[in-house]
Amino acid sequence: MKILACNSNRPLAEAVAAALHLKLATASVRRFADLEIFVEVHENVRGEDVFVIQSTSYPANDHMMELLITCDALRRASARRITAVIPYFGYARQDRKAGPRTPISAKLVANLITQAGANRVLTLDLHAGQIQGFFDIPVDNLAAEPMFARDIRSHFNGRDIMIVSPDVGGVVRARAIATRLNCDLAIIDKRRERAGVSEVMNVIGDVRGKDCILVDDIVDSGGTLCNAAVALMGNGAKSASAYITHGVLSGNAAERIAASPIECMTITDSILPTEAVLQSRNLRVFSIAPVLAEAMQRISDESSVSSLFD
């Protein structure tokens, strides 16, 4: 078993390797003068079970090409099996035709990863579960709900909590956590006038006097969650917090969240946190390295991954 890290989130890769008591494989992922990507693996991987850790986060296209070229290099070096470990799967929000003459980019990315030589994919909280079906190779889609449920129990012990889905599409995810915590569920009903702009319309459920916890898979601009927190507080909630798997946090999202009524937003390190995130008063980073390490060990041992979440 060998672990190879590309450039998107090296601290996470190092934490995963440390959890498995391994060293990262020596490799170079660098740019030519015209910014073409060049990958060179500096140790023998023939017949090895190789895991490539790379989130396809910003800059998404550069990080995607790094992953594809690394998989190709390993395939041509006769690695026995190549597992693409993609903690944050970019382009996942383009999982269907949203209008006429538009692409299904998530399917295209799945084809590219497969053709580059990956034999298996390990990822975390895909934006849409059906993306697993876009691949013709096995996909292990880890869930953040068990980790979040344990963390909520320890941080909100003794408080009257309510799990809140920030939109109708996230109800299944929010309900899974509410079921684990044996607490009530509320839903934010919103109308989106155009991409990137959301307007909160109504809160479905009685949140008065509750410590509300918003749960979602991705926070990008932060507008939806900030509007949801305002709506919850306006409906009598005692506090508003959030647990989000992937902290994309583009633009001035960290500042927007810092200025919002959100008491604390917990995100994972599936995407390398920026300095603005680390310095924010109400953003907290939760490491997924132990879960990724355990899943990778089970894949290498050919044992059950799904039992991680029983």
Image (cartoon, helix red, strand yellow):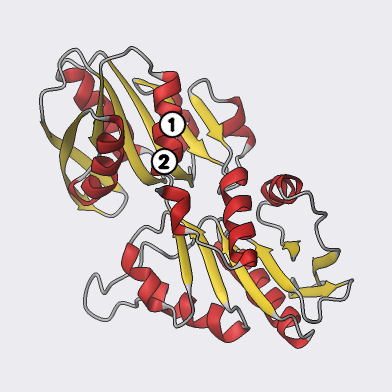
Question: Which sits in the foreground, 234 or 82?
Answer: 82
C-alpha distance separating marks 2 and 1: 6 Å
**Amino acid tagged 2:** Pro
- 34 is higher (above) or lower (below) than 127: below
Quadrant of the frame with the N terminus: bottom right
Q: Residues within 10 Å of mark 1 (few under 14, many from 20)?
A: few
Mark 1 = which residue? 150
- Mark 1: amino acid: Arg
Give the residue at x 39% y 70%.
132
Question: Residue 269 occupies which quadrant of the picture?
Answer: top right
Residue 156 point in image, percent of width and height? 38, 18
Q: Nearer the viewer, residue 186 or 80?
A: 80
Q: Quick check: marks 2 and 1 in contact, CB under 8 Å?
A: yes
Q: Is residue 210 above or below residue 36?
A: above
Q: Which percent across, then down, holds residue 186?
A: 17, 33
Image coords of residue 192 (percent x, y) = 20, 49
Of 287 and 6, the residue lying toward us: 287
**249, 185: nearer the viewer:** 185
Compared to 142, does 260 lie above or below?
above
**For numbered disc 2, what is the local secondary structure?**
helix
Question: Which residue is identified by label 2?
Answer: 146
| Residue at the (31%, 28%) spot, across then down | 213
Q: Secondary structure at mark 1?
A: helix
Q: What residue sits 48% from the left and 42% below the top?
A: 249
On screen, residue 14 above or below 222:
below
Tell me where residue 158 appears, x and y as whole percent. 33, 12
Looking at the image, residue 290 sits to the left or right of residue 103; the answer is right
